[in-house]
Image (spheres, rainbow, N blue to C red):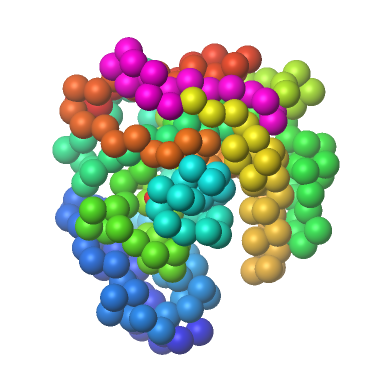
């Protein structure tokens, strides 16, 4: 730990204010180049406590930077995790206000809901499949609080992995009804296909992303409780959106998720 608890709380307030005031900021490692990984997650957890303290509810967890497409796009190499709050969630077909966001981008993800707790270290795909209640499609709307979406890993961890909104839809299925590695997704923006991917683009198998989350939480003495909604990370590079854009993500065997940006 390189930062004091005071500085961690200040940076949490600074980043959360950027979200709530819809005003971008420069990446925090510019001012605190010595901050370490623990500091980065401590800032993220301090943001989470601020929201919980206001009575907002946690709605799930997310992994990020789990596909090569995303790692390449953002110039980073290690997956990260973050949290989801109830107020990020939007229903299928929602109108999402861009005026509430800085510079939104969308990405298609595969989400899991657990029916048993998962513990690391040593969690693997087999444990995850056995503990999965069902899988469902989700589109995440990212909104980095950093200017021009430019950050390094520690800065983006502190900023809760750019989390802002997410939309679930389609139909849920049990894992034995799905070929998760080969499960295809087609993303359309305004009726045009802009990206395609398969489940294996996420760490070789999307369940590997949930296992990695359990293992990362295990290092902190935490686990994934039963009944947790988990987004496994963008399968393709994120796609910038603006008011007027209509997004449809069509998933093999899982139906579709759509939204309109207004
Ligand atoms: C970081 C968030 C990454 C994902 O699914 O890869 C993420 C970012 O790219 O802004 O949510
Ligand atoms: Mg994501």
Q: Main secondary structure of the magenta part?
A: strand
Q: Quadrant of residue 116?
A: top right
Residue 39 can be seen, yes or no: yes
Residue at x-position 48% and y-position 78%: 36
The correct choice, above or below, for 136 with respect to 200 in the image is above
The correct choice, above or below, for 17 with respect to 235 in the image is below
Residue 183 lies in the magenta stretch: yes
Q: Quadrant of the C terminus?
A: top left
Residue at x-position 70% and y-position 63%: 218
Q: Image check: 198 left or right of 70?
A: right
Q: Image check: 176 left or right of 198?
A: right
Tally of numbered tags: 0
Residue 172 lies in the magenta stretch: no
Residue at x-position 40% and y-position 60%: 156
Front-most of residues 61 and 26: 26
The correct choice, above or below, for 258 with respect to 102 in the image is above
Front-most of residues 120 and 57: 120
Residue at x-position 59% and y-position 16%: 252
Percent coordinates x, y for residue 169 in the rendering = 49, 21
Q: Quadrant of residue 14?
A: bottom left
Percent coordinates x, y for residue 76 in the rendering = 47, 59
The residue segment tinted magenta is 180-195
Front-most of residues 68 and 102: 68
Q: Quadrant of residue 160?
A: bottom left
Q: Image check: 194 left or right of 234?
A: left
Percent coordinates x, y for residue 128 in the rendering = 76, 42
Front-most of residues 175 and 55: 175
Residue 169 can be seen, yes or no: no
């Amino acid at each position: 730990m390189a930062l004091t608890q005071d500085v961690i709380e200040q940076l949490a307030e600074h980043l959360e204010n950027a979200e709530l005031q819809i005003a971008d900021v420069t990446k925090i490692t510019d001012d605190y180049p010595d901050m370490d990984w623990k500091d980065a997650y401590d800032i993220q957890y301090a943001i989470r406590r601020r929201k919980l303290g206001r009575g907002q509810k946690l709605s799930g967890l997310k992994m990020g930077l789990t596909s090569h497409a995303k790692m390449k796009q953002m110039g980073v190499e290690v997956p990260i995790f973050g949290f989801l709050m109830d107020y990020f969630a939007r229903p299928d077909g929602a109108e999402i206000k861009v005026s509430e966001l800085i510079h939104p981008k969308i990405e298609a993800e595969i989400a899991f809901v657990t029916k048993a707790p998962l513990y690391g270290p040593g969690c693997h795909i087999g444990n995850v499949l056995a503990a999965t209640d069902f899988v469902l499609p989700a589109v995440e709307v990212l909104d980095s609080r950093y200017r021009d979406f430019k950050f390094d890993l520690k800065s983006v961890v502190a900023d809760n992995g750019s989390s802002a909104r997410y939309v679930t839809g389609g139909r849920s299925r049990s894992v034995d009804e799905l070929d998760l590695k080969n499960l295809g997704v087609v993303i359309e923006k305004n009726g045009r296909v802009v990206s395609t991917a398969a489940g294996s683009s996420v760490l070789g198998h999307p369940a590997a992303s949930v296992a990695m989350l359990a293992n990362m939480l295990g290092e902190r003495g935490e686990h994934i409780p039963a009944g947790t909604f988990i987004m496994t990370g963008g399968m393709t590079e994120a796609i910038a959106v603006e008011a007027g854009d209509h997004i449809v993500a069509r998933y093999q065997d899982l139906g579709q998720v759509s939204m309109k940006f207004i």
